Image (tube, grey):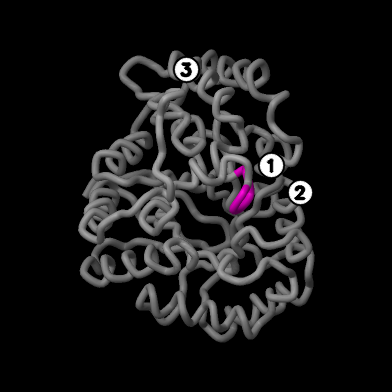
Amino acid sequence: MIRMEQRVLGKTGRNVSVVGLGTWQLGADWGEVAESDAFAVLDAAVESGVTFFDTADVYGDGRSEQFIGRYLKGRPDAGVFVATKMGRRADQVPENYVLDNFRAWNDRSRANLGVDTLDLVQLHCPPTPVYTSDAVYDALDTLVAEERIAAYAVSVETCAEALAALARPGVASVQIILNPFRLKPLKEVLPAARAAGVGIIARVPLASGLLTGKYTADTVFAENDHRTYNRHGEAFDQGETFSGIEYGTGLAAAAEFAGLAPEGATPAATALRWIIQQPGVSSVIPGARSVEQARANSGAAALPPLSPSTLEAIQELYDRRLRASIHPRW
């Protein structure tokens, strides 16, 4: 297996690869994936040095967790840290975020993953009031005491939610959308996380594929792909799809971004490298639906840091093309 740079994931105290693997694609919402293909992707990631998988109980209604559990049962040598998320299978009201539900959700995820104790459980973008509820954090502390989970964290949609969670001493990490088309977290969230010793997991790093530079106005996504049915937030937060950017605007910006890639680097690898070198990032979690994608994503960790001139050009592109078109929420 290839050795990849490892960083401490905040208050978990555990080392994880700087490029992890997001496994939303292995569950649903990006089109169907066969089990054999899912296992091939997981194996390619591990062989490329990945030691961090991110999943959720809602991805394929548990299918992603089950794939990971079965795969790791056959690969005890992989040394993979698995973070899962909970909460999105229930109605999204604060009243559902209580200890009894947490226990039930954890028990299901433990069964899916085939473990007694979950490495890390993240609240999965719950209603905003959940992030400031004392009872919620007391319940999470109870799960740690009961050894259902080793640590807990949050996944957020907004910087304000991230900052609220960072004020809680038990929060080990924060998962947030961060990519060259989503710069707002750089201003407050990443510095606050560093000061608190909290890890940052960067998700949607390629803006749902926009930053690969492969899409055009004629690209057609499958009917069951969220890039078809959630472009305007019809099913969940719009920020999860193309980072909340209007598709045509994103295409134009992506074409320019592709021209900023250093010689020998793809636009996707350039975007991942940009995220890796942001101070405070523990791991970036691109998804993959093929062995080739998994290997290419992992390879971004071996690229040299982007030059100051490239970093300045990315900032200028964002300011000129995207800043005015992105909702202030993001």
Q: Residue at x 36, y 24 (%)?
A: 266
Relative image position of residue 59 (x, y in whole percent): 45, 61
**How busy is the neighbourhood of tag 1: few (under 14 within 10 Å), some, or many (20 plus)?**
few
Relative image position of residue 247 (x, y in whole percent): 55, 29
User: Closer to the N terminus: mark 1 or mark 3?
Assistant: 1
User: Closer to the N terminus: mark 3 or mark 2?
Assistant: 2
Query: 151 left or right of 62?
Result: right
Magenta run includes residue 235: yes
Kindly identify the amino acid type of the residue bearing the numbered disc 3.
Answer: Ala
**How busy is the neighbourhood of tag 2: few (under 14 within 10 Å), some, or many (20 plus)?**
some
The label shown at residue 191 is 1
User: Closer to the N terminus: mark 1 or mark 2?
Assistant: 2
Q: Main secondary structure of the magenta part?
A: loop
The label shown at residue 160 is 2
Magenta run includes residue 97: no
The label shown at residue 255 is 3
Relative image position of residue 24 (x, y in whole percent): 43, 54
Q: Residue at x 61, y 71 (%)?
A: 90
User: Which region is colored magenta?
Assistant: 234-239
- Tell me the mark number nearer the camera, choosing from 1 and 3: 3
Q: CA distance from mark 3 to mark 2?
A: 31 Å
Which quarter of the picture shows residue 34?
Answer: bottom left
